[in-house]
Image (tube, rainbow, N blue to C red):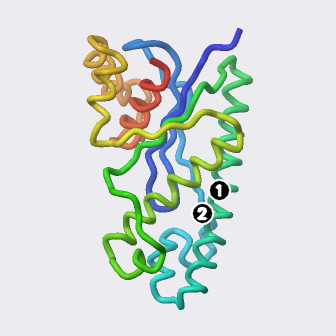
Amino acid sequence: MQQPAAIGIRVHSGWGALVAVAGKGASVEVVDRRRVEIINPRTPGAAQPYHFAERLEVNKAQEHVMRCAVVSKGLALAALQQVAGQLQSRGYQVAGITILLSSGRPLPAFERILAAHALIHAAEGEFFRQAFRDAAEELKIPVTGIRERGLEVELKSALGAAAPGLQKRVAGFRSVLGPPWTADQKLAALAAAITLA
């Protein structure tokens, strides 16, 4: 019988830090971790599609963002298929994917985003999170989002008294796994552990 595993993802411009964990409570183990690139680096403006679109006429700007979205979703889909397939071959079944969210409010209409630099940054974060979300949905893997600022509260809610032990264990993985084990991997691992709880 396959053991359940969960994936946590923390997104940056053009890539995501992906960590898969298995196990329960404070005894989770990291079973995969990788940097997943979800842009074509040869496409101008792919890493910051809204920044690039800001200089274009609205219709061309929308076309650029939509083209980039298709590519990013395709790359996210291929990466998640590969991770799920490799985990399956090792006896794990992906039970869910958790994407870390910003604490931002819902985005306004496209033209209003392009008119405000702060909204451009927010839109780009959401753009890359959406690529992973769409890919997970296409693979029929349950996907949830947890606000990064609320992660500790969610952890305590899901794990109760085991939460501090899990945080300590995850922080200590760097000495076991070696680099990279930064805030990206730690937060992704904690998000994945909540999905398993």
Which residue type does callout 1 highlight? Lys
Measured as percent of width and height from the top left, residue 70 is found at: 67, 63
Residue furthest to the top in view is 1
Measured as percent of width and height from the top left, residue 10 is found at: 44, 45
Which part of the image, by quadrant, shows the C terminus?
top left
Q: From the viewer's perspective, is 15 left or right of 76?
A: left
Q: Nearer the viewer, mark 1 or mark 2?
A: 1
Q: Earlier along the polypeptide chain: callout 1 or callout 2?
A: 2
Q: CA distance from mark 1 to mark 2?
A: 9 Å
Q: Identify the residue at horizontal 37%, vertical 67% (top origin).
A: 121
Q: From the viewer's perspective, is 154 left or right of 23?
A: left
Asked if 133 appears above or below 190 in the picture, the reply is below
Which part of the image, by quadrant, shows the N terminus?
top right
Measured as percent of width and height from the top left, residue 168 is found at: 28, 21
Q: Secondary structure at mark 1?
A: helix
Q: Which residue is mark 1?
A: 73
Residue nearest the observer in this picture, 71 or 63? 63
Q: Identify the residue at horizontal 70%, vertical 44% (top origin).
A: 138
Q: Secondary structure at mark 2?
A: loop
| Picture quadrant where residue 112 is located | bottom left
Measured as percent of width and height from the top left, residue 77 is found at: 68, 48
Q: Identify the residue at horizontal 46%, vertical 61% (top origin).
A: 13
Which residue type does callout 2 highlight? Ile
Mark 2 crowdedness (10 Å alpha carbons): few <14, some 14-19, many ≥20: many
Asked if 139 appears above or below 62 in the picture, the reply is above
| Disc marking residue 115 | none
| Disc marking residue 39 | 2
| Picture quadrant where residue 111 is located | bottom left
Q: From the viewer's perspective, is 48 left or right of 152?
A: right
